[in-house]
Amino acid sequence: MPPPGEVWVEARILSQLGLARGDSITLGYSELRIGAEMLSSPDRGTGFRSFSPQLVMHSDDLDATGILAPGSRAQFRLLMAGPADVLEQFEIQLQDSLSSDEQLFSLRADQPMTGAALGSALSYLKLTALIALLLAALTIFLSLRRFSNGQHKRCALLLSLGMSANDLIRLYLCQLLIAWLALSLLGTLTGVLLEQLILSWLNELLPEQLPQPTAWRYLSGSAMGFSLLILLGLPPVLQLSRVAVSSLFRDEVSASDKRAVSIQLVCFALLAAALLTFLEAPLAALTLLLLILIGGAVFGWIAQRSLRLLTRPLANKLLLGRLLLMRLEQQKRWHRLQAGVVILLMTLLSLVWISRTDLLADWQAQIPDETQTTS
């Protein structure tokens, strides 16, 4: 805030009165020095009061000016900032204790256009973050499933040579850890470089520099990736540790027991909890997760059935068509899973594009048609 004897004014005051920074301005019975030109103010507000130019002065100089007297139409404001949950609780407490000449303003209430835009942008960013995490999870799940299906012979050979199941689990977990370290380092460096590039563009447009994020923000992506990799990679690794040695001599895949299914369910539940905690929007994220899981199961079954129906005409005419039909029947679960995941990936990408289009359309609808931009 300006010190006593000094005022901050908007550029309109300087242009209308022909003043500059360092000149003096008479306000009531006092003469104060112009110390700075204000570029923006958090409590500027909207409505008719926004047409008048704004001047900020120290409260110690208010009595000497004599501009406040009985009958003056003065408003007193107390600006508050803090964590969102604390402000919401405090707002609820103040609503019941306000008198007839007191009013509580918030960003959404006093700035409806800005509040609606920020609310829509926040929802879009949370939706984009959830979809990005789901895309990563589905990609990791599909890759690890394909990788584990091709490791049965190797695991059976290692177990026949005397390697214990625990050593085999440590071996594959170390491989996952090395992959996570390399990719997280590359991803974090790429994110930091992109952030600095975007900040260099925005600093030329914004009146003030954006606040620097905390160190946890840089590490949150790697931590979330590690959670996804372990929760999705642990069930296939545990299943590989129980491969039968007899699979070296004949092609057989160990059937999933109740323990493996239980571990998968626990890992998926922990993954869902991690996603809900990371996004801080549990209801919307849980609803989207349930819809995606149901949609993936239904569309995966439809795709698998459609593939079989398209292959039957070939099986009646070509010898290779019969072989193809037998192969589809042997791997129907894998094809159903693969088709469901691919359909989900396309659905998530379409959802991001549709949400972006709707968000821009809502913003443009709030701006009058005759609005012009100047630079």
Image: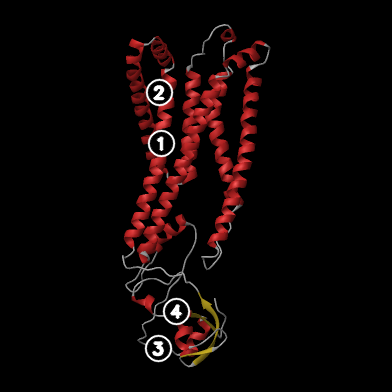
User: Disc 4 residue type?
Assistant: Gln
Q: Nearer the viewer, mark 4 or mark 3?
A: 4
Give the residue at mark 3: 69
Cα gap from disc 4 to disc 3, whole angstroms: 20 Å
Check if mark 2's residue and mark 1's residue have beta carbons within 8 Å: no
Vertical arrangement, residue 291 with respect to residue 30, above or below? above
- Report the residue that reaches farthest toward the right: 162
Q: Nearer the viewer, mark 4 or mark 1?
A: 1
Q: Nearer the viewer, mark 4 or mark 2?
A: 2
Position in image of residue 309 (x %, y %):
32, 18
Give the residue at mark 2: 336
User: Disc 2 residue type?
Assistant: Arg
Cα gap from disc 3 to disc 2, whole angstroms: 79 Å
Q: Quadrant of residue 76?
A: bottom left
Q: Quadrant of the N terminus?
A: bottom right
Q: Which callout, 4 or 1, points at the residue further toward the start of the chain?
A: 4
Q: Nearer the viewer, mark 3 or mark 2?
A: 2
Q: Nearer the viewer, mark 2 or mark 1?
A: 1
Q: Which callout, 3 or 2, points at the residue further toward the start of the chain?
A: 3
Give the residue at mark 1: 346
